[in-house]
Amino acid sequence: MASILNTFKKFSKRRKYIRYNVRNDTFVNLVPGKQKVQMVDISLGGAAFIYNGRPEDLNASEALNLPNLQRLHFDTVSDISAPGYAQSPDDFRRCGVKFKWIGATDKAELSRFIEEFRN
């Protein structure tokens, strides 16, 4: 019975924030390590980006650095092979993240980033 309830919750739950596609030339850095990743979409609650490597390579990352907004901490929600890319051990992957707590000042900076880079 619990699994039926969980399935129902999963399908009935809507996003809290609108997701916006970003321009193709939008890159941000993961922290620590400064790995550059291509952002795909973003909202006030999370983002998705494409990176090259294995999921284990991403495990050490804990935050994104955006212009004017350093160390935006996140939890990984999904990490799948990116559609349309070659399959290899070090292929491109699409990672979806949920942002952790964001203060009012950082939320304002994130809103400015979204307005500037959304497609």
Image (cartoon, grey):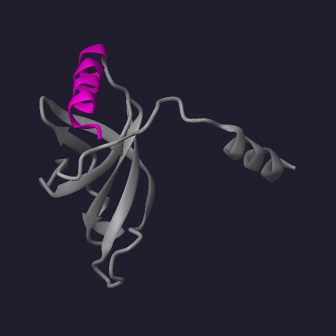
Q: Between residues 60 and 36, which one lies in front from this camera angle?
A: 36
Q: Between residues 59 and 81, which one lies in front from this camera angle?
A: 81
Determine which quarter of the picture holds residue 85.
Answer: bottom left
Image location of residue 104, percent across then percent down: 30, 14
Determine which quarter of the picture holds residue 79.
Answer: bottom left
- Residue 13 located within the stretch drawn in magenta: no
- 9 lies left or right of 68: right
Q: Residue at x 35, y 67 (%)?
A: 93
Answer above or below: position of 114 versus 42: above
- Residue 115 located within the stretch drawn in magenta: yes
Looking at this rendering, what residue extends furthest in the bottom direction?
88
Is there any visible trace of residue 31 in the rendered image? Answer: no
Image location of residue 20, percent across then percent down: 38, 38
Is there any visible trace of residue 62 in the rendered image? Answer: yes
Q: Between residues 21 and 63, which one lies in front from this camera angle?
A: 21
Q: Residue at x 42, y 33 (%)?
A: 45
Q: Residue at x 20, y 31 (%)?
A: 116
- 48 lies left or right of 39: right
Q: Between residues 64 and 2, which one lies in front from this camera angle?
A: 64
First to last magenta residue range: 104-119
